[in-house]
Image (cartoon, rainbow, N blue to C red):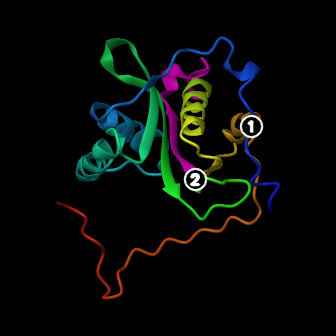
Amino acid sequence: MDDELAPAPTPGPLTAGLPTARAATPSDAAGIIRLRSEYVLSEPMGEEWIRRCTAELAPRLAPGGDARAFVIDAPGGSMAACALGLIHRVLPAPSYPWGLAGRVHVVATRPDARRRGYARAVVRALLDELRTEHVTLFELHASQEAAPLYREFGFADSPALMRMTHLEEPGGRLPDRRT
């Protein structure tokens, strides 16, 4: 398991000739959420969920928040691609001595903007930023078509990954996180 947790290789030729990604701000939250809804989730979210997720993400993208994202703007002011990472604390270990992990939560590119290096550019910018913040453990879930890109960055498959979704609270209700 330690091999899976080894630090990712340092940037190299993967950055040559990439489009320029910019750091996202809280005002980009809605665009990131819309790209996630339309191109990442198995079923697009309704407007209420888009509003709720935008309200959750925006303050997390502000200075001091736990979210980092990079985007590439499309002509006309829309968003062509994004990569969103969430930082969380874990117990330190030799492979992640600062006890910081980063989950690459969203990588999305509009279909009309694909095959231009946008996903590579936003992921590279995100990983570079997380490394400057002493994140040394990186996690993500990858589709089969995206897995080769992530392997180029040093991600490895993990047979140990398991997942469970449990929506109900102990009292049998769904959580209401609206404010």
Apparent side of residue 131 relative to residue 46 in the rendered image (left or right) = right
Q: The magenta stretch spans which residues?
A: 101-119
Q: Position of residue 88 (x, y in %)?
A: 50, 56
Residue at the spot x=75%, y=19% of the render? Answer: 13
Q: Nearer the viewer, residue 48 or 18?
A: 18
Question: Label 2, label 1: how many angstroms apart (C-alpha)?
Answer: 22 Å
Residue furthest right in the image: 3
Q: Is residue 114 above or below residue 86?
A: above
SS under mark 1: helix
Residue at the spot x=66%, y=39% of the render? Answer: 146
Apparent side of residue 157 relative to residue 130 in the rendered image (left or right) = right
Q: Position of residue 129 (x, y in %)?
A: 54, 33
Q: Which residue is mark 2?
A: 101
Residue 103 lies in the magenta-colored region: yes
Apparent side of residue 35 relative to residue 48 in the rendered image (left or right) = right
Q: Is residue 144 above or below residue 16?
A: below
SS under mark 2: strand
Image quarter (top left, top right, bottom left or bottom right) of the N terminus? bottom right
* Amino acid type of the residue that numbered disc 2 sits on in the rendered structure: Ala
Quadrant in the rendering for residue 63: top left
